[in-house]
Amino acid sequence: MEDQQIWDFEEGLWTGDADHYRELIDQDCLMVLPAPPFVFTGSEAIAAVSDTPRWSSVALSEKSVTRPQEGLIVIAYKAEARKDDDESYSAHCTSVLRRLDHGKWRVVQHQQTPPMIAPAKS
């Protein structure tokens, strides 16, 4: 998968509908999201995100791609997402994609870390 295809794939996970999301997330996926229970596995990971409202737009920056072996892609990036009602969300993310067949990729790991809030000075 070429770099632009990777970023189009990832962007589609943020903005696509629930069926699109379910199609691209592997049943063995592990996710760490900033909401309880924080660690999600398999169908929990799919349900956690597919049952939430989708983002209207997302901007991906600070993008990095590695290919540690054939059929495995690891990416890291910053996401800045918005909904039509002006709700916004920002996080640094990682995803691992594995190839199942020619042109058929699935997410097997995803993690989101929202910005840290500095403690108040006393």
Image (cartoon, grey):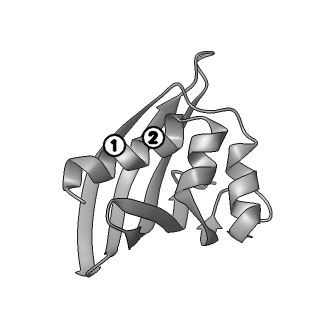
Whether pointer 1 and pointer 2 mark residues with C-beta atoms closer than 8 Å, the reply is: yes
State the residue in front, 13 or 112. 13
x 70%, y 70%: residue: 42
Dot 2 corresponds to which residue? Answer: 12
| Neighbourhood count class around disc 2 (C-alpha, 10 Å): few under 14, some 14–19, many 20 upward | some
For numbered disc 2, what is the local secondary structure?
helix
Q: In which quarter of the image is residue 39?
A: bottom right
Q: Residue 101, position in %: x, y? A: 38, 69
For numbered disc 1, what is the local secondary structure?
helix
- Give the quadrant of the N terminus: bottom left
Q: Which mark is residue 8?
A: 1
Q: Name the amino acid, label 1.
A: Asp
Residue projecting furthest to the front: 102
Q: Residue 54, position in %: x, y? A: 62, 33
Q: Name the amino acid, label 2.
A: Gly
- Residue 91, placed above or below residue 89: below
| Neighbourhood count class around disc 1 (C-alpha, 10 Å): few under 14, some 14–19, many 20 upward | few
Q: Residue 58, position in %: x, y? A: 43, 34
x 75%, y 53%: residue: 47
x 45%, y 58%: residue: 93
Q: In which quarter of the image is residue 29?
A: bottom right
Residue projecting furthest to the top: 85
Measured Cα–Cα span from mark 1 to mark 2: 6 Å
